[in-house]
Image (cartoon, rainbow, N blue to C red):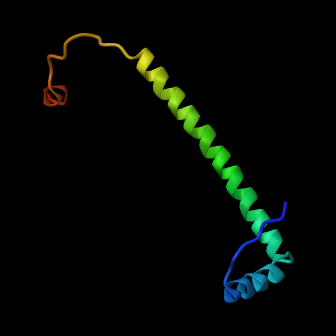
Amino acid sequence: MNITLSLQDDLVRRVRKIAVDRDTTLTGLVRAYLEKLAVEDARLGRKRLEQEALAISFDRISYRVGKRNWTRAELHERP
């Protein structure tokens, strides 16, 4: 698919120099960046789903053991 971008001439000249240094083209740089972006987004999406599933599991599993009748200070008292 062809896409038209509007970029400043100076930016295009600088990025083309970078592309030559990396033995690729401007199109190659853009393609590589977009592919990396898509992979990262997929990874984040999967991570987000896993975190939501974990949170749901914690909500389902959690239970109360009884009334708390101690304080943090009492737990850390030294005899």
- Rendered location of residue 9, percent (x, y): 70, 88
Whether residue 69 sits left or right of residue 41 in the image: it is left
* Foreground pick, 36 / 10: 10
Query: Which residue is pictured at 30% across the width and 13% down the height?
Result: 64
Q: Residue at x 63, y 38 (%)?
A: 46
Q: Is residue 67 left or right of residue 17?
A: left
Q: Residue 69: horizontal and vertical position, in percent?
A: 14, 16
7 up-or-down from 31: above or below: below
The N terminus - image quarter: bottom right
* Quadrant occupied by the C terminus: top left
Seen at 29% across and 11% down, the residue is 65
| Residue 73 percent across, percent down from the top left | 14, 31
Q: Is residue 22 above or below residue 46?
A: below
Q: Position of residue 72 (x, y in %)?
A: 18, 29
Residue 46 vertical placement versus 23 (above, below): above
Looking at the image, residue 7 sits to the left or right of residue 59; the answer is: right
| Count of number-bearing discs | 0
Report which quarter residue 36 is drawn in. Answer: bottom right
